[in-house]
Amino acid sequence: MTAPGRRPGPGGERATVVGGLSQVFASGEYRTLLAGQAQSLAGDQVARIALTVLVYSRTRSPLLAAAAYTASVLPWLVGGLVLAGLADRWPRRQVMVACDMARGALAGLMTVPGMPLPAMTGLLFAVTLLDGPFTAARAGTLRDILPGGQYRTGVAVTMSTFMAAMVAGYAAGGVLVAGIGARPSLLLDAATYLVSAAAIRLTVAARPAARQRSGNPAQALALVFSSGQLRTCMLFGWLAGVYTVPAALAVPAAASVGGGPAAAGLVFAAAPLGTAAGAVLYHRAGAARQARWMGPLAVLCCATLALFAAGPGLAAALMIITGSGAAGSFQVAANAGFMAALRRDQQAQAFGVAQAGMAAVQSVSYLAAGAAAAAAGPAVVIAAWGIGGAAIALALTASWRPYARAAGPGRNPVAVADDLA
């Protein structure tokens, strides 16, 4: 990193990025967390497609299909707000291993022959409920093992890798569900959790709990909303509940252009594919440019979806969603800025508040989009959501502008935001 207030020399930003990458990947703990979570995340997408396809094939209802997809999101509202604090109270490795083992067992139950759809949806709800404490523990562990500027690099690499895992999971999920059926595909998801648990237990170092007792969720809410940096970064993160609506409508959207499960898998995969590529390029821009570009990219991410108003075919729709996903790389700066502003003993609970809020936004957004799509069609709804999201992003950009202006060349926007908050 360059010293505050100084311009990097020729190639300085690039050299910093390359050096940061080598330092990040030198950590065996980071490599384990990255690989383990990536493969279990890919399995999650297979499970989402399997359940959504099962529901839509039996009901032909966009609302019920969106509701099934929402069942994999809504538990974050409880898991993030209430359970995430466990990652501060208990050793984080212990929390991650326990959550992975429990999720593997619950996902395995979904494969029992004759399991009714309501029961499968309930099991998926329970699996996702445990994502809250697991993700909070993983985020806190990353802050422990990646000091200073390495954390921002780690966030960018993690986002790119996770998006690539989602692409693989969605694309393979559509093919698997079409080829071998939904329930066998779910068995793969169960296996990924157990593999992740074993890898974390064997390679991630044991560390003491961040604090002796869980914080009060009300105190975490007050902390997050009283800080300008935390509040703005979190609200930028919540935009994901708007611009990811194509995923909630993927199955009916694919059906509307004559596609089946494989086409739905491509719709699911398009945005993560764009974000995986965009996050790499965005990180290479350097910290100061990331701060300045976060707002404009958020606006572009949502506004791109307005092109659905033209009623595109499958190929054009995939290009639009991929472009929107690429602009969604602004989440690198939002995530890093949020976590950097927190003490170690605040991280899990505050991260849980952000997760819970995102779950609430996504749940309301997806269900409303499903209901609207039943009347107006998926393309019209996606376009409307994109326009609305762009308007929200413009307002957030205005809130972020003082931080972006203060982040001159070579300055760390997180440090600047800390000064202004």
Image (cartoon, rainbow, N blue to C red):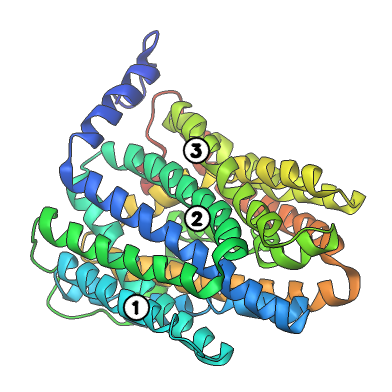
- Residue 410 percent across, percent down from the top left: 39, 24
User: Is 86 on the left-hand or right-hand side of 184?
Assistant: left
Total marks placed? 3
Residue 364 in view, yes or no: no
Circle 3 residue: 279
In this view, the residue in front, 49 or 372, is: 49
Mark 2: amino acid: Gly
- Determine crowd level at label 2: few under 14, some 14-19, many 20+ residues with C-alpha closer than 10 A: many
Identified at 27% across, 37% down, the residue is 150
Identified at 83% across, 47% down, the residue is 307
In this view, the residue in front, 263 or 320, is: 263
User: Is 381 on the left-hand or right-hand side of 331?
Assistant: right
Circle 2 residue: 169
Circle 1 residue: 219
- Determine crowd level at label 1: few under 14, some 14-19, many 20+ residues with C-alpha closer than 10 A: few
Mark 1: amino acid: Gln
Tag in front: 1 or 3: 3
Seen as rendered, the residue at the extreme front is: 180
Mark 3: amino acid: Ala
- Residue 198 percent across, percent down from the top left: 18, 62
Q: Are marks 3 and 2 in contact (CB under 8 Å)?
A: no
With respect to residue 5, does 49 lie above or below?
below
In this view, the residue in front, 116 or 275, is: 116
Q: Secondary structure at mark 3?
A: helix
- 1 or 2: tag closer to the N-terminus: 2
